[in-house]
Amino acid sequence: MRHGTTSGARQETRVGPEAARRRSFAVISHPDAGKSTLTEALVLHAHAITEAGHINGKSGRRHTVSDWMEMEQARGISITSASLQFSYRDAVINLLDTPGHADFSEDTYRVLSAVDAAVMLIDAAKGLEAQTMKLFAVCKHRGIPLLTVINKWDRPGLDALALMDEITERTGLNPTPLTWPVGVAGDFRGVLDRRTGTYLRFTPSAGGAHVAPEEILDPDAAAAREGAAWTTAVEESELLGASGADHDTDSFLAGISTPVLFASAVRNFGVHALLEVLVDLAPSPGPRTAVDGVPRALDDPFSAFVFKMQAGMDTSHRDRLAFIRVCSGLFERGMVVTSARTGRPFATKYAQQAFGRERTVVDTAYPGDVVGLVNGSDLRVGDTLYLDRAVEYPPLPTFAPEHFAAVRAKDAGRYKQFRRGIAQLEAEGVVQVLRSDLRGDQAPVLAAVGPMQFEVAEHRMATEFTSPVTLERLSYTLALRTTREWVAALDAERGVEVLHRDDGVMLALFPDSWRVTSVRRNHPGAVLEPPVAA
Ligand code: G4P
């Protein structure tokens, strides 16, 4: 059943223009690079909120909105946010949240299947850090255009040209700075806007509590004001130009180059420029290609896929949210859509937007938007939903787990609850569940990308599924896919164990890469492949 056909028909004609206004992106960074600060500053700047301090989930910081789980509160981390929508100029910006702590999960990666662009946020003093590189690898694999923001320029840090070299060497991307700092890191005077040649002078505002005023000076005034610092910036900018580091839209969209901005998120500097660049340069949603290789046009009937499941956010309601990214058509709350996997109808009566604790009802949504569907327990990560004409999008990639733990019910009498809970966590993609005859069904192995997932699993098993568990951490760090004929040979190797997933994939677990090398030597023909899907 679809309601509101007249208004629906009118709104459907708006799908194309509405999709064109959307900019859906995520910030990828290492913890502490300033992602929460930047998020807050972007929203602040876009006037979506009137007071800073609303979005951040860090402990001790003003009002926090992303602290659903007790665990999050205790740790001051954000593990369950989803997306944030705000308008800027005539654009609608969807900022999808990637968990910002050291322990990340497959969710962090999956969010990148739902964005059209990403901002790589780098701490000027640290350069490219481990988590940024991991997330970058996913963006590269998916061909997601990347903008780069060098943050914390107000503090002593690396040399700007050296940072550009590091980006080139470690990511293979060609950095094309749009702005160039005047003054070294720690002596941030402002930036040279390389597109106009003007000087954007940095006038610090107190603690970033309001929008920083920006003063624009022409080159002569800039030279008079900043002297040698300006001359150096101009010379370095010319050097960049001569080495082909000027922005080029095609190579940015193709994932070959990355426009770079210099910023101080905590001082609100560079935030305005980032919003402008997102609106002017970042791509709007395009047609998504289905499993059969056919792209679904943006103005085709509604379709979306589930990129994230979230449960246990509100213990009093026991609700479960399935977050979908709209790929085509108009979403209207209340419409009944079909799940491509089960063929079953799904009523979208309760549709929400969730960021932190705040939730707002979503009545309509367009391609690029994120909607949280309540009561999504029939849905799984990767599921496609559609209206009218059937479509199915390719499954989301799974990523190689690096942490493993054998799980058991504390109370053997609660085995039914234990099984139900483990199955649910597996369906939601919180953990992968590996089994073997040797270990039996009572003690499967949980596998995760980040160890935090074990704490989530443990917490939910106790509170939500009423079957407290014990977890025994295993010393494996690597899982490689193998085939049935190799199981016996690999199982016989010291320190190696083969288990299987429910989808039939066999995974050989290793303590480290040295062991992989020696096993490969012993069994030259053994199939041992990374389990990362395309
Ligand atoms: P994250 O979400 O990426 O983990 O980082 P977050 O924004 O929480 O920032 C980490 C720390 O870096 C915070 O300091 C924050 O204030 C600081 N920071 C962020 N951007 C800038 C910047 O542009 N310049 C400088 N100098 N610092 C920046 P904290 O001490 O951990 O927290 P707080 O007490 O300041 O809130």
Image: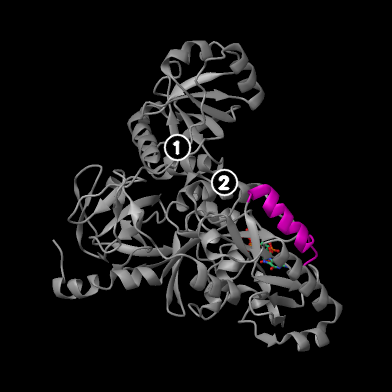
> Residue at 50% across / 78% down in the picture?
49
Instruction: Name the kind of residue labelled 1 in the image.
Output: Ala
- Residue range corresponding to the magenta coloring: 155-172
Question: Nearer the N terminus, badge 1 or badge 2?
Answer: 2
Q: Residues within 10 Å of mark 1 (few under 14, many from 20)?
A: few
Residue situated in front as seen by the camera: 128 or 99: 128
Secondary structure mainly formed by the magenta segment: helix
Is 229 on the left-hand or right-hand side of 24?
right
Q: Return the residue at label 2.
A: 137
Query: Which picture quadrant has residue 264?
Result: bottom right
Q: How is the image coloured?
A: one colour
Q: Return the residue at label 1.
A: 533
Magenta stretch: residue 164 in it? yes
**Ligand 1 visible in quadrant:** bottom right
Is 294 on the left-hand or right-hand side of 485?
left
Query: Which picture quadrant has residue 462?
Result: top left
Instruction: Name the kind of residue labelled 2 in the image.
Output: Ala
Q: Secondary structure at mark 2?
A: helix
Rounded to the nearest angstrom, the CA distance separating label 1 from label 2 is: 13 Å
Q: Does residue 226 lie above or below 366 as drawn?
A: below
